[in-house]
Amino acid sequence: MRRPAAPLFLARAVYRQRRLRDAARLLPIFGFFLLMLPLMWGSAAGAGRVAVYVFGVWALLIGLAAYVAPGLAQPEADAQQPEDA
Amino acid sequence: MPFNVLVLTCLAYVAFLFVVAFVVERRASRGEMRFLRSPVVYTLSLSIYCTAWTFYGAVGSAARTGLEFLTIYLGPTLVFVGWWWVLRKLVRIGRRQRVTSIADLISSRYGKSNLLGVLVTVIAVVAATPYIALQLQSVTLSFSVFAQTTPETWVMPDRDATAIWVAAGLALFTILFGTRNLDAKEQHHGIVMAIAVEAVVKLVALLAVGIFVVWGLGGGPVAMIERIEAYTDPNWAIQPGRWAGLIFLSAAAVITLPRMFQVLVVESVDEAHLSRASWAFPAYLFAMSLFILPIAVIGLDRMPSGTNPDMMVLTLPLQEGQGALALLAFLGGFSSATSMVIVETIALATMVSNHILMPAWLWLRPQAALSGNLRGAILLARRLSIIMVLALGLEYFRLSGGSAALAAIGQIAFAGMAQVLPAMLGGIFWRGGTKLGATLGLSIGFATWGFTLFLPSFGAGAAISAEVLQNGLFGLHWLRPQALFGSDGMDPLIHSIFWSLALNIAGYAAGSLLSFPDPVERIQGAAFVNAFDDELQAERLGWTHGQAEPEALMNMAQRIIGDEAAISFFEAEARAQGKAGFLPDLTPSFLAGLERNLAGSVGAATAHAMISQLFGRATVTVEDLMAVATEAAQIMEYSARLEEKQGELSRTARQLREVNEKLTQLSVQKDAFLSQISHELRTPMTSIRAFSEILAEGDLPKARVAEYGQIIHTEARRLTRLLDDLLDLSVLENGAVQLNLTLSHLGQMIDRALAVSSQTRPERTFDIRRDYPSEEIYLRTDADRLVQVFINLISNARKYCASDAPVLRISVRQKGGRVVVDFIDNGAGIAKDAQGLIFEKFARLSDDGRAGGAGLGLAICREIMANLGGTVTYLPGQRGAAFRVTLPLRMDKLVMEKQDAEKLR
Amino acid sequence: MRQVLLIEDEANIAEALRFILSRDGWEVSVVADGALALAEVARLRPDLVILDSMLPGMSGLEILTALRADPLHQALPILMLTAKGQLRDREAAERAGVSAFMSKPFDNSEIRALVRELLGA
């Protein structure tokens, strides 16, 4: 027996939750990209400016993670996760 | 700041931690876990990532290389912010499989291979030993800082003695709270709470120093940033390779370091806490890092040149005359060091005892899995491991002299543990990873790390000769430790990470692609990779039906996880299966659950081996592989269950049909009962009446009178006997019978029965075959009643056995507390459809063998035997009529009372 | 002399009937086995058959049915005796064509009168 085929279009809540998961997956990639940027600034930038930038990115990542996390912690709206399986 | 005040504060602080751990353990054992289950405690416990290396070393690192220290905290930040990728799965698998350590995770994933467990353990111990030494070093250093400032009040004890005292104290604490019990999961609530308290202390201490520096000395944040901007040092330029490499390295370390794995996965009480920690732990790291750079810049500015920057967190407040602040900083550093050592030691000790000591012990004494005090052995192994790990760290510290910069040692440890990363990530995301691949990758990576980073770190000529360092191994130029394959343009650390992980991954991939996993590996692989597929997790790990007894398994489980825990586990499992009592059926799911439970105490590989031992080396069969193929197995199982149910239904239907048939036949019999009784009574009456009338006429010859008188007498007796039988039966059926229990010899009873029944058809000579020795039994029963049954059976044989040379075999056997007597003749036997009826009243089978009986004999026998606590049954398939009498050897009051109770019902 | 065939397996009852009926001047033969009864009837050609209902080998009702099926014995007087005393048996016997029916136990005078009547004396 096969699983019933996943429906083509999802309910709004489920759709939002899936996109939230996508966001959660993208977050570290986004963060890594931002953290690599100072490497291209060359020696013109002093330690103070780089530090302010890095701490700013850091705070942004923490804020975004805190925004996304409660939604992710919800019990899964759909029992199956075809993307993961 | 007097030195003895410092020591007293320190002791008071430690005592406070003891109390915290003790109270929490007490509460946890009483089941009051609510405050332990908070995500805050979980997040704070993760802070053991920040060791003394962070607390003291970060400032040192910032003073030397500027912003580079941040990479160590940015890597974990990315991992936690991206928890949905790896951490979530890791925690789920850890909880599902009851993983006890990172070595257990790898061993369990790759077919519960103990070789891999040993390998990871060795890597972890080698990588962690310098790291533990580093913590001891920082504590002794911080003591000496205070001792130097107040030489007049206290003589600084020598460096080694301080380290020994600290190590001994930590060993005591760890043994006390780390090996109190062998939990199903390796969780230590007391320690986790103490760690959380220490996390708060070190954060508060560092923030306090930072605030003092920025606002007290630096003139506020804006001025501070300007000062940093203005600071120029060629070493402060960001090196792109190291920046990216160290972010990656720390990201790898946060999931592979034994202590991180311990708090992140093993001590996790609720998966949901992870979502909170995903931003809260980065926030903690953020706060810890915030003031590092200002402290470094101000320190470099205000401290005399040549000051050890690794101790600036302590020396800066001291120099500024802030004794209380310095004391707080000291406690923060002390907290950082001790919490790391405690958790690291527990994690390493678990690995060493589960993967090295216990398997070795079981290998030396294979019978120990079945006997002996396993629980005690495991606890002892755990304690020995703790002492060993701490002793190793202490010894490393004494030998190395503690000269190397804190940061370097931490990075070396990170790189060593990172070798586990390919096997770990491959294991949870790729079903194709195999034991051979993991072994190959780990060994190559470990060797490369050792050759390119660890051994050279002791300095030229110490572990690796300057010759090799300069010209390569065996004089081969491309085997230079710090310039493998001619890559001499790289930073040594990045060089080592690059080559060790590259070769590691290559080995892992090649080994996996070229080898074929064994069944256990494939099952575990599927369980790990599909950790979120709940249906798949239900029936995992194929224990096939072997021949272990549930008792034996319970016995073993009791000795490992403790009596209470084992009994309640077995009872719960039995209840889940719908069985009463404590012994569940040995279903694959039960065994998998039991193994997971045991794995919590002794590790997956050992648990598997132990159950295998009891299970007669059960291996995984083709059917189990089918279970890996998932859905098919589920369907099969479902249909099997249906089939089982159907079987049950048809069994019930058959029983109903049988009962119904019997009832129908019985009702016919009952209907015939009156007619039978009538017939049996009227027949003798007819003769009596006819002859008495004849005699009454009075004109008969004397001989005739005597003859007819005799007939009347015989028939009258027949009538009496019939009435006796009927009465007998009614008494027996109503249970109103008085039993006369005596001790009687079975052989003699058979003798009596044979003598009496020889009057039945005396013209027939029967060959009676007996086995006299077996009849030498004394029975406690009602002898007369039993003889009555024997007479009936023997008489029946005499009456109905149609053989020309009739033989009656009487055999006696003893079976438990019961005696079985069989009466088997060589006649035609009883037709199958009649066998169910012969014990009913008046069930004479046909009229051709009637010999004056009324058909009540066997019905009476059945009732007598029921009263004697036994049975009489027909034994089919004996080539003749065969009756089996079964009765208790000693009939006692209890049996009688039980029967009475049954009758009342 | 008129011939009476007594088909009865209870030896004592047969003896009693034989004694009573021979005293009345009838010639009485006895068969104890139902299976032999039909052959005896054919051999002796009795004027009256007294038939017990419960017999070994072949039941009284079966013998009765078999006799009546033979045109030779359609008019043969048959007296059936039964100890069961149930109405159902009596009805079955009457349907099968019994001449007279009597329950056990019986009065000697009763059966003697009935035999006389059946033999048309």
Image: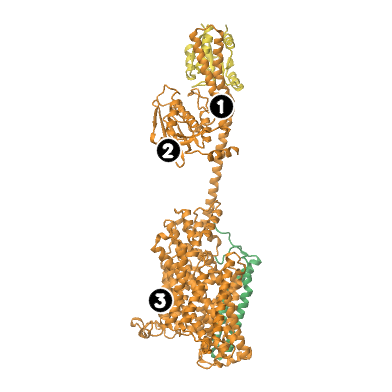
Q: Chain of mark 2?
A: B
The residue to which callout 2 is attached is: B813
- Can the viewer see residue B834? yes
Q: Foreground residue, B854 or B158? A: B158
Tag 2 secondary structure: strand
The numbered mark, 2 or 1, whose residue comes first in the sequence reads 1
> Colour in which chain C is shown?
yellow
Which residue is the site of mark 1?
Answer: B726
Task: Read off the chain for label 3.
Answer: B
Display colour scheme: by chain
The quarter of the image holding the C terminus of chain B is: top right
Q: Amino acid at mark 3?
A: Ala
Q: Tell me if I can see residue B414 in this picture.
A: no
Q: Quadrant of the N terminus of chain B?
A: bottom right
* Res. B447 mark: 3
Is B439 in front, or is B206?
A: B206
Q: In the rendered image, what is the letter of the chain coloured green? A: A
Q: Amino acid at mark 2?
A: Arg
